[in-house]
Image (cartoon, helix red, strand yellow):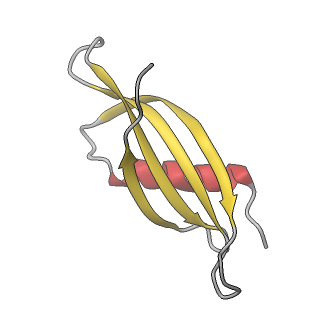
Amino acid sequence: MSKEPREVVIAAYNYLAAVLPPTQKISDVRVEELQPVKGVAEIDKMWWKVVLSYDNLGEFPFDKKREYKEFKVVDEDGKVEYMKPISHAST
């Protein structure tokens, strides 16, 4: 059974919230990319590539930085296999 896109995004967001230190404040979480990916071989499972961005807030309101994280979420069970930071060039 295939996961709904909403379920996949929620899994990525929950993973992000679970691994961030409780003192780290974030805001304005956005879905930047959501893509289903089929495995190459028949035994490979389908998964989702999810990119979330958020403002990493500092001590002051003007002290914030936009961060981007890529997640691999397995379609079958909704588990996050990895999260990694990605660089995003400002325009």
73 is higher (above) or lower (below) than 64 = below
Residue sitting at 66 percent across and 84 percent down?
41
10 is higher (above) or lower (below) than 40 = above
Residue sitting at 41 percent across and 48 percent down?
17
26 is higher (above) or lower (below) than 10 = above
66 is higher (above) or lower (below) than 2 = above
Residue sitting at 52 percent across and 61 percent down?
72
What is the tally of numbered marks visible in this picture?
0
Where on the picture, by quarter, is residue 75? Answer: bottom right
Asked whether 74 or 39 is in front, the reply is: 39
Give coordinates of residue 69: x percent, y percent.
Answer: 43, 46
Q: State the quadrant of the C terminus.
A: top left
Where on the picture, by quarter, is residue 42? Answer: bottom right
Q: Residue furthest bottom?
A: 43
Q: Residue furthest left?
A: 59
Asked whether 8 or 88 is in front, the reply is: 88
Asked whether 23 or 63 is in front, the reply is: 63
Q: State the quadrant of the N terminus.
A: bottom right
Residue sitting at 38 percent across and 54 percent down?
84
Give coordinates of residue 74: x percent, y percent.
Answer: 59, 69
Give coordinates of residue 80: x percent, y percent.
Answer: 50, 64
Asked whether 2 or 24 is in front, the reply is: 2
Left or right: 35, with 25 as reference point: right
Q: Residue furthest top?
A: 62
Give coordinates of residue 90: x percent, y percent.
Answer: 41, 23
